[in-house]
Image: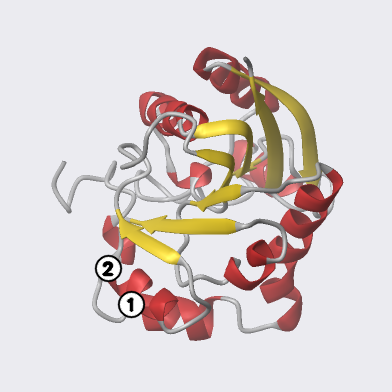
Amino acid sequence: MGTDDPRNVGAKWTGASSGAHYATQRFRGTRAAQRDPVLVDAILREHGVRGRLLDVPCGTGRLSEMLARHVESHAGVDVSRPMLAEARAGAGVRLAQASAEHLPFAERAFDVVVCCRLLHHLREGEQLERVVAELVRVSDRLVVASYWDAASLPALRVKWGLKRDEGPRGRCARPRAEIEHTFVAAGARCVEFRHSFRFVSQQTFVVAERLR
């Protein structure tokens, strides 16, 4: 898959300045910066997560400090070298450069896998299936992943033609039923869906439990 292929979700994050931009500009407001960490923190706490954790994609490591409070050890994976360079400047965590479609870990290597802000970049159903299958494969217990909810107001505005679709390189929302089906096909069951603001915010977290 070439860098100009719209299916290459990592292409937009591999530029030389992408890591610095993401670390300093992407979540400048306090509210925006805290939204994901607060939600993931609550999910991990309520599900009693311990042990080994994988953060993929870890980006610039913005979740690392919060994740470290829950587990004995955690690793971060990202396809972007500039992102990983910024992550190394932050809290200590074992890092690796790899694609979420081909994770360099054994089956059940982690107790929990956190996947924040990736699935809504996967416009092709087959690519979504491959990524979810990998997340479930390396998890021994839980996968906590965010996606964009097709039932949210912003997504409905796109569907009704009131807001422009982002095109083949843009982000896309998916129905809850499709997310559930994809995790079931990968060998997990969805036990919870968590929203920032139900129907208003597109960002939704699904908690999936690997079936034994």
Q: Residue at x 68, y 83 (%)?
A: 29
Q: Nearer the viewer, residue 172 or 145?
A: 145
Q: Quadrant of residue 210?
A: top right
Give the numbered dot on residue 77. Answer: none
Element marked by disc 1: helix
Q: Quadrant of the N terminus?
A: top left
Q: Amino acid at mark 2?
A: Arg
Residue beneath label 1, please? 85
Q: Nearer the viewer, residue 102 or 69?
A: 69
Q: Quadrant of residue 122?
A: top left
Residue 136: x percent and y percent?
52, 29
User: How dense is the environment of label 2, judged by Cα within 10 Å: few (below 14), some, or many (20 and up)?
Assistant: many
Residue 104: x percent and y percent?
31, 42
Q: Amino acid at mark 1?
A: Ala
Residue 85: x percent and y percent?
33, 77
Eyeballing the image, is 179 above or below 120? above
Q: Quadrant of residue 194?
A: top right
Give the numbered dot on residue 81. Answer: 2
Eyeballing the image, is 207 above or below 43? above
**Is 111 displayed left or right of 3 in the figure?**
right
Name of the residue lying farthest toward the left? 2
Q: Nearer the viewer, residue 21 or 192?
A: 192
Q: Nearer the viewer, residue 128 or 57?
A: 57
**Is 29 displayed left or right of 61 in the figure?**
right
Element marked by disc 2: helix
Query: Label 2 vs label 1: CA separation?
Result: 6 Å
